[in-house]
Amino acid sequence: MKGFVMTGVVIAAAALAGGSRDAQRSASSMNEIAESYVKLVLALGQHDTDYVDAYYGPAEWKQQAEKAKAPLADLAGRARSLLERVTKLPAPSAEMERLRHQYLERQLSAVNARIRMLQGQRMTFDEESKALYDAVAPTLPESHFQTILDQLEKAFPGGGPLVSRYDRFRSRFVIPREKVDAVFKAAIQGCRERTRAHIQLPDDERFTIEYVTNKSWSGYNWYQGGFRSLIQVNTDLPIYIDRAVDLACHEGYPGHHVYNALLEKHLVRDRGWIEFSVYPLFSPQSLIAEGTANYGIEVAFPGPARIAFEKSTLFPAAGLDPGGAEEYYRVQGLVEQLAYAGNEAARRYLNGEIDRAAAAAWLERFALMPKDRAAQRVRFFDQYRSYVINYNLGKDLVRRFVESRAGGTDHEAKRWLEFATLLSSPRLPSTLK
């Protein structure tokens, strides 16, 4: 019996050693593919100024990409080769390793798609969003939005277009330009306190704020690496009181700043997964980034907590009457249900079914955007195309994923835990089930 036991131990040990060597070889291959992926993304950024949203890997890799300026045809060949290599690797058994494998495969597929687009290939709105973001937004008829608009008609009776009546109502809640910075900083402080109470962040995380103009977006987070961000706020158009918390959460806590800092801490520094040191904007990662940033607003400020915070802190900082807060957010709750109207305008516009003027008019009618904001949004369609699905569809997918595991607002601690886990992992949109 002893001999049998010892033989079994030896055989088992040999099998484990062999399995360990296989795992090591697989990890080594993944690391090689990851490095090549980063260099490929940086090279593609030479052809697409919006493509590389963040990079904090070795500086010489970026310098090499800038110097080489490889042709798109060469990049297409590199992308296909890398995708073939990662596809042939056996799927790891450990969940995080398996998620990494899936992530690299899908990100490389999106790189392929973006190269084809830059080479002139045209896709429909839905084909493009599937190829780049691993998701397709639902198509909704005009009747869906009209039902919501009919409810808003009752809230704002009278003559003239509904968008004008709604805009007059909202004008009471514009933050005076000279108070924007103070209000925004107060909102950030509130978001940060609530986030740090539930998520352990690096001690030296920080960011700076800039106010900019002439942009197609309202806010942007430029992650710098080293747990630092540059947050820019566009002041082209009036900033309403609700946008203070929206932007502070979305761009800062627990949104983009926290997402990028946790990826850097847990995946790049702790695990050595260099692929997360670069963020290609037109990729599945963006749906996770935008979806968590938008859903993070609800996580940080669920329902009544937000109104209470704004009435006690932000309305006074802006010099606005907090007595109108409840009415304002009742209306905003209805308007938020029109979120997918932007997708429909973009889908029709980018598919060539309507022109620029018709797209703006559609946004005015069905998304209740005033003329200047609708025009800004169409400029966003021109620049970022099907990226628009990442905000609303991303939010809905993230909410469904987190709350299916944690429950709703009655399970605050569990919801924060599941949300933080998602922020720290390489999940894809198609895995949010």
Image (spheres, rainbow, N blue to C red):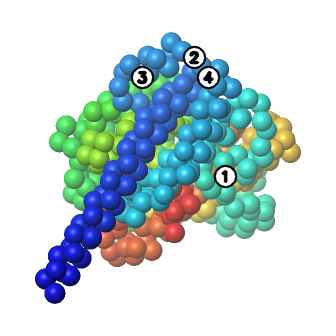
Q: Amino acid at mark 2?
A: Lys
Is the residue under label 3 in contact with that under label 4 (CB below 8 Å)? no
**Which is nearer the N-term, disc 1 or disc 4?**
4
The image quadrant of residue 136 is bottom right
Instruction: Find the distance from the CA under tag 4 to the CA under tag 3.
Output: 16 Å
Q: Residue at x 68, y 26 (%)?
A: 73
Q: Residue at x 29, y 47 (%)?
A: 271
Instruction: Find the distance from the CA under tag 1 to the CA under tag 3.
Output: 29 Å
Q: Residue at x 37, y 38 (%)?
A: 274
Q: Nearer the viewer, residue 136 or 169?
A: 136
Q: Which residue is mark 1?
A: 130
Please tell me whether mark 2 sits on a helix, a strand or a loop: loop
Q: Which residue is mark 3?
A: 61
Q: Amino acid at mark 1?
A: Lys
**Which is nearer the N-term, disc 4 or disc 2?**
4
**Which is nearer the N-term, disc 2 or disc 1?**
2
Q: Which mark is residue 69?
A: 2
User: Crowdedness of circle 2 by 10 Å Cα count: few (<14), some, many (20+)?
Assistant: some
